[in-house]
Image (cartoon, helix red, strand yellow):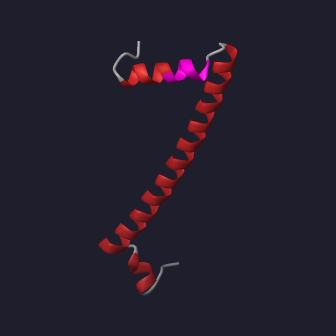
């Protein structure tokens, strides 16, 4: 069945296509942010586990962060 009237034409116009594309882009951005948040949580959990297993203190972690920030990350 064919659409009739303005409803069928709205997606065919450049403006309609832009609106649909913007909606899809916004949805992709939301999904990407959700994935990023999950990856961040997983990384933090791994960091906590690794620090506990290797007895890495917060002082050591902070010293390593400072060294990395000053270009001495090796």
Range of magenta residues: 57-62
Residue 40 sits above or below residue 67 on the image: below
Residue 68 is situated, as x and y percent measured from the top left of the image, at 40, 21
* Residue depicted at x 53% and y 78%: 1
Residue 6 is situated, as x and y percent measured from the top left of the image, at 41, 85
- Is residue 13 among what the camera can see? no
The C terminus appears in which quarter of the rendering? Answer: top left
- Is residue 67 among what the camera can see? yes
Name the one closer to the observer, 21 or 11.
Answer: 21
Residue 7 magenta-highlighted: no
Residue 71 sits above or below residue 19 on the image: above
* Residue depicted at x 38% and y 25%: 69
> Farthest front residue?
59
Name the one closer to the observer, 39 or 64.
Answer: 64
Residue 60 is situated, as x and y percent measured from the top left of the image, at 55, 17
Q: Is residue 50 left or right of residue 9?
A: right
Q: Quadrant of residue 40?
A: top right
């Amino acid at each position: 069945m064919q659409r009739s009237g303005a409803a069928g034409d709205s997606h065919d116009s450049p403006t309609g296509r832009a609106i649909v594309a913007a909606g899809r882009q916004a949805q992709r951005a939301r999904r990407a942010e959700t994935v990023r948040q999950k990856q961040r949580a997983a990384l933090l959990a791994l960091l906590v586990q690794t620090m506990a297993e290797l007895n890495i203190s917060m002082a050591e972690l902070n010293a390593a962060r400072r060294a990395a920030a000053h270009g001495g990350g090796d």
